[in-house]
Image (spheres, rainbow, N blue to C red):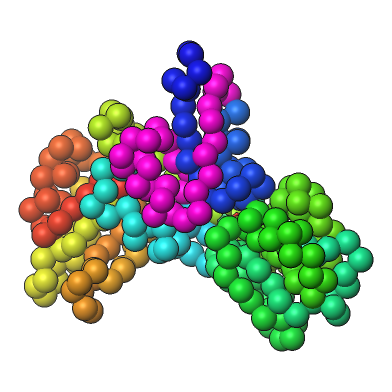
């Protein structure tokens, strides 16, 4: 492949972010790719939807804090689809300038997901003020740039080392086995979807029992419900759309027939992934 022709893959942050680590693992067997960092999820999705990149690695779920709505909400009405998922263990450390002690620190910077995965640490250290930052690695780079001994970042081992910081505490995530699930996403025009796991976004008809009827149909067809999350529909106060994941390995009808039933029961339906 000539240069400029290689796979461009988008992720949140700068080198050392958890998304970049997941991307490097996902792409390790590829001959040539370029990892492109973005400052927020919307920018990654815009780049993928307009085919400026061909793939994106986006966190969608965490074992401690659950569904990551700040990313999944942005998938709606976009021509993008997950073609795989991957689970990565996420261990957070608190990083500061060399020489700083925990007792010096007043302000902690990180991605909101990382901050919320360390709730117990913050409850035990109420003197610390939390600040949301674009991503964990950028937060670590900011601590190095600002040179202020009372500031710290929550980030990975690799980010702390890359940006020349010292770990004040390690493994500060609330759950020892903290794991993040990432979607590997592509433009829907560039993929042939196959696989036994289906991810859907549905806005069901606003009538009594609409969701429960659909769930019963899934049960009757031996589609195993793996997850269900409700989110507000933009512009429709107190109306909810549903993110569903189904295991189709035992399904007793064909995929196209399943989608006909889903479409009939919904005002809007979108396949968010199949792998
Ligand atoms: O900020 C990062 O490093 C990210 O990639 C987002 C994130 C934050 C916490 C856990 C997993 C992903």
The answer to whether residue 274 is seen in the rendering is no
Q: Measured along the vertical axis of the image, is residue 138 above or below residue 274?
A: below
Residue at (26%, 43%) from the top-left corner? Answer: 79
For the C terminus, the image quarter is top left
Residue at (23%, 79%) from the top-left corner? Answer: 238
Residue range (magenta) = 29-58
The answer to whether residue 79 is seen in the rendering is yes
Asked if residue 270 lies left or right of residue 168, the reply is left
Asked if residue 55 lies left or right of residue 50, the reply is right
Is residue 249 in the magenta section? no
Residue lying at the far top in this picture: please name it: 1
Residue lying at the far bottom in this picture: please name it: 126
The image quarter containing residue 56 is top left
Residue at (47%, 31%) from the top-left corner? Answer: 8
- Which percent across, then down, holds residue 268? 15, 56
Residue lying at the far right in this picture: please name it: 99
Is residue 34 in the magenta section? yes
The one of 169 and 104 positioned closer to us in this rendering: 104
- Which percent across, then down, holds residue 52? 37, 35
Residue at (34%, 60%) from the top-left corner? Answer: 73
- Which percent across, then down, holds residue 156? 71, 54
- Which percent across, then down, holds residue 241? 24, 65
The image quarter containing residue 196 is top left
Instruction: Give the total number of marks visible in the rendering.
Output: 0
Quadrant where ligand 1 appears = bottom right
The image quarter containing residue 111 is bottom right
The one of 49 and 29 positioned closer to us in this rendering: 49
The one of 30 and 271 positioned closer to us in this rendering: 30
Q: Measured along the vertical axis of the image, is residue 111 above or below residue 7?
A: below
Asked if residue 2 lies left or right of residue 162, the reply is left
The one of 185 and 44 positioned closer to us in this rendering: 44
């Amino acid at each position: 492949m000539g240069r400029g022709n290689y796979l461009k893959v988008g992720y949140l942050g700068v080198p050392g972010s958890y998304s970049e680590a997941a991307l490097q693992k996902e792409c390790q067997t590829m001959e040539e790719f370029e990892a492109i960092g973005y400052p927020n999820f919307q920018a990654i999705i815009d780049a993928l939807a307009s085919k400026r990149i061909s793939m994106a690695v986006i966190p969608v779920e965490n074992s401690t804090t659950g569904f990551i709505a700040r990313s999944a909400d942005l998938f709606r009405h976009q021509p993008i689809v997950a073609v795989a998922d991957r689970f990565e263990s996420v261990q957070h450390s608190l990083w500061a300038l060399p020489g700083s002690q925990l007792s010096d620190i007043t302000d902690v910077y990180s991605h909101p997901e990382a901050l919320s995965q360390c709730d117990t640490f913050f409850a035990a250290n109420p003197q610390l003020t939390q600040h949301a930052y674009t991503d964990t690695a950028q937060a670590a780079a900011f601590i190095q740039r600002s040179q202020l001994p009372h500031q710290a970042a929550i980030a990975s081992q690799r980010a702390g080392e890359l940006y020349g910081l010292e770990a004040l505490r390690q493994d500060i995530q609330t759950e020892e086995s903290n794991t993040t699930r990432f979607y590997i996403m592509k433009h829907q025009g560039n993929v042939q979807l196959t696989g036994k796991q289906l991810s859907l976004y549905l806005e069901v008809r606003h009538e009594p029992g609409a969701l429960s009827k659909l769930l019963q149909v899934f049960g009757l067809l031996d589609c195993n419900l793996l997850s269900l999350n409700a989110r507000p529909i933009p512009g429709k106060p107190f109306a909810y759309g549903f993110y569903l994941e189904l295991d189709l390995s035992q399904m007793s009808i064909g995929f196209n027939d399943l989608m006909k039933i889903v479409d009939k029961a919904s005002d809007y339906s979108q396949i968010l992934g199949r792998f």
